[in-house]
Amino acid sequence: SPAKSWQARISEATDSIAQAFVESVSYDWRLYKQDVAGSICHAHMLSAVGLLPDEDREAIIGGLREIEAEIDRQKQNWPGFKPEFEDIHMCVEAELIKRVGEAGRKLHTGRSRNDQVATDLMLWTIFATKELGELYANVLKAFVAMADRSADIVMPSYTHLQRAQPIAAGAEVLAWTEALSRGYERLARFAANYEFPLGAGAIAGSSLPLDRKQTLWFAKRFGILAEDTNRLAMSSIDATATRDVAQEFVFGLAMISQTLSRWAEQWILYMSTEFGFIKIADRYTTSSSMMPQKRNPDMLELIRGRSANVYGDLFAMMTLLKGIPIGYNRDLQEDKRILFRAYDTVTQCLIMAAAIIDSASFDKSRIEPTLDRGFLDATSLAEYLVTQKVPFRTAHHIVGTLVATCEKSGRHALAQLKLEEINAVVASLQPGAALTDDVYTALGAANVVKRYQSTGAAGGKPFQEQLAAWKKRAGL
Ligand code: ARG
């Protein structure tokens, strides 16, 4: 009997160099659960439309379940993974036929590896999104716990890396929480929209009375897909030639990497002697082979650096697809190499990130002494003037003048100005206006942070609300 199920057409065995070159089972074995799940749905559909006797269906499903359980235990060492069968689909099918005989030879009815691999890929990506969700939950939890334990620390915020306005330190932590969670939600949204390709066959569908709606229905009934998501792919040609799933997934991963990279960069800066705002545990740092004093944030640097790989994966994926004529081409097999690589990189980064965040704290002793530098309260003073009926543009001008007054007279904070000095400038630019001592409640970083009122603001009640919402979401 021929070594491969399609050997009949080919006059000689595959060259050994070509065999090693074409095989993908060494990495696509990771699709085994999805391959089995898709096959089970397909078998149910075949029997529902009368193409597969019930006893054959049961033999197939029993055989597939056994195979799955064995691979669960042995992973890539499962003896059924043979490079001469090329890929996961052929390995599983060959083993099934070995085990259940004739019934197994009927499973591939109306199906091709082309719709099979597209299905496996879609199901794997949905599964991987869920897996990512668990790692994600740990990162979010770590961020939220940190925001919570830093809730009473006030720090400067920066635009252009120049001091901007004072904020609750926890609010900056929640900014990363927010950005990162959006990254996950994007993936989940993509996943809910992937179109189910099974039954599209090799390219043109089938002349057999397949009922693809039923296949999809079985996938939902067995909990492989969620009830209210994932429509049927409507063109058999497009369904087998398209890799939107892989592209969207890697794009989502690239955005997650980007957020992680920006966060890592932020903390690397904060860990410098110049800032000294954040401390992480020594176990997540390294020292220097030459400079004995060093404490380097290498793990954060690697999180930043690994984003380059994921961007590369996104570019590889898009380039892979740009020149492929419609219909399946073997180039498409490369999608999995790229997809798995990007996924593995991001999952490792998420695991590392959660551990680092868990160990991190703001260094109040370094942050507090500098809060009265950089006129962080200037905007607050301008807004205070607005409450005294001064138009904002005039208020902006008044405060700008007061900041210049401070600088000219060697004072570093607006609170150092006497009320008469403030009022002199106020009256010169807004005739008739005069402030009382109450103005000092709008000055000083700690005072300012308490005054924030707008939804989403980085202090005061709005911050407490964000924190409470996140604690609830994170189960803290
Ligand atoms: N291993 C292949 C892939 O991942 C499966 C599809 C192969 N189909 C074919 N007709 N050669 O893309």
Image: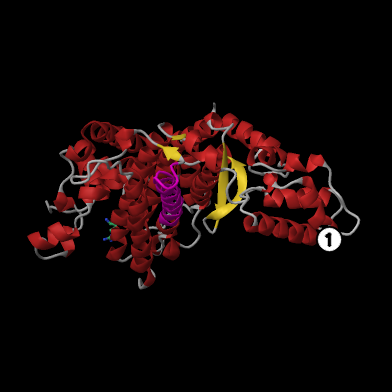
Give the camera-side residue of 345 and 242.
345
Number of marks drawn: 1
Residue 403 placement (x, y as % from top left): 67, 56
Q: In this view, which residue lies farthest toward the front? A: 409
Residue 60 vertical position relative to residue 51 in the rendered view, above or below? above
Q: Which residues are magenta?
A: 249-276
Residue 88 placement (x, y as % from top left): 25, 48
Magenta-colored stretch includes residue 252: yes
Residue 168 placement (x, y as % from top left): 60, 39
Which secondary structure dominates the residues rendered in magenta? helix
Residue at (11%, 51%) from the top-left corner? 1
Residue 199 vertical position relative to residue 174 in the rendered view, above or below? below
Magenta-colored stretch includes residue 226: no
- Left/right placement of residue 255 relative to residue 30 reads right
Residue 400 placement (x, y as % from top left): 70, 59
Give the camera-side residue of 58 and 178.
178
Q: Secondary structure at mark 1?
A: helix
Residue on which disc 1 sits: 428
Residue 53 vertical position relative to residue 414 in the rendered view, above or below? above
Q: Amino acid at mark 1?
A: Ser
Q: Is residue 174 visible?
A: yes
